[in-house]
Each structure stands twice: as structure tokens, then as C-alpha cells.
Image (tube, rainbow, N blue to C red):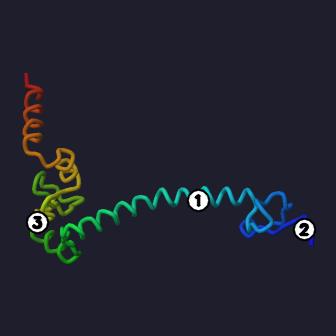
Amino acid sequence: MDLTEKYCRKCERLSPIHNFKSEHSYFCRDCHKEIAKMKKRKERNNGYMERKKQRRLYRQHNGTKIPRFTRKDRAAFLAKYPFCMICLSTKNLVADHCHTTHKIRAVLCSRCNTGLGIFLENTTLLQNAIAYLDYFREKPE
């Protein structure tokens, strides 16, 4: 049986047989390219999930258990500390934790928490930043 046209399952059209990779293909060449692109994009995005999974497995293997901060814990923390412990803001509050012990320390706003992370939670770097700001502070005339 000699076919001249074939049905593509993706675009749902009849196309000439030469528009398919082989006579056994379910998709025309254009749809096949599109599917391959989507697959690549998905694999790239899944790389994040794969890295996250690897970190979890590493922690399990090394015996480091990361405590879970439940909604109930968060509500209790926010009731105890309804403001950022650094700038006293009441907006965008998050739980700050130690990156070595993984213990929850206190409540910070997301800006202060990010700032600590950028300074690698290093008090020397933070003191140097304070000295820098003090040195270049504009003096009132």
C-alpha cells in the first residue's frame, strides 16, 4: 500500500508523506521540531528540580535534617515577633534561619533577610559596610 499523505496527530492535518521523518512518525516535521523544543525547555526547567532533589538526597545521606517551618509555626512566630528584628518593618515578613544549623532564628522582612544573605551572614563584612557608610555620610553644613 503506497501512501502519499499522512495524518499528523498534533496539528491534526493531512500532509504529504515527505513532511514526516519516516512513514512510522506520528507527527509532521514542523510539529516534531516544536515538540523537541518544548521538551528541551522542559528539561532545562527540570534541571532546577533535579538540583533541589540532589541537595535533599545529599542532606539525607549526610544526616543533616532540615527542620520544617509549618504554617502553625509561622503564625506563632509572627504573633511573638510581628515585626522585622532589624528595621522594625511589618511588611513581607519571613523566617530567618541559620545556614549551618538550619535552626529558625527570628522574623525579618525579606529585604533585611536578603541583605544578610548577600553579606554571607559575616559580621566582619557587615561592620565594614557600616564603617563605609559612616565614612561617606554627608555631613550637615
Left or right of residue 52, residue 46 in this image: right
- Residue at 19% across / 47% down in the picture? 115
The amino acid sitting under disc 1 is Met
Disc 1 is placed on an element classified as helix
Q: Residues within 10 Å of mark 2 (few under 14, many from 20)?
A: few
Please name which of the two marks, 2 or 1, marks the residue nearer to the observer: 2
Give the alpha-carbon distance from disc 2 to disc 3, as whole Å: 74 Å
- Residue at 84% across / 66% down in the picture? 14
User: Which numbered disc covers residue 3?
Assistant: 2
Which quarter of the figure has residue 23? bottom right
Disc 2 is placed on an element classified as loop
Q: Which percent across, then down, holds residue 92?
A: 24, 59
Quickly name the residue at label 3: 81
First along the sequence among labels 1 and 3 = 1
Left or right of residue 101, residue 24 in this image: right
Count of marks overlaid on the render: 3
Which quarter of the figure has residue 52? bottom left
Q: Nearer the viewer, residue 76 or 122?
A: 122
Disc 3 is placed on an element classified as loop
Quickly name the residue at label 1: 38
The amino acid sitting under disc 2 is Leu
The quadrant the N terminus occupies is: bottom right
Which quarter of the figure has residue 78? bottom left
The answer to whether residue 129 is above or below residue 96 is: above
Please name which of the two marks, 1 or 3, marks the residue nearer to the observer: 1
Please name which of the two marks, 2 or 3, marks the residue nearer to the observer: 2
Q: Nearer the viewer, residue 72 or 45?
A: 45
- Residue at 9% across / 37% down in the picture? 130
First along the sequence among labels 2 and 3 = 2
The amino acid sitting under disc 3 is Tyr
Q: Residues within 10 Å of mark 1 (few under 14, many from 20)?
A: few
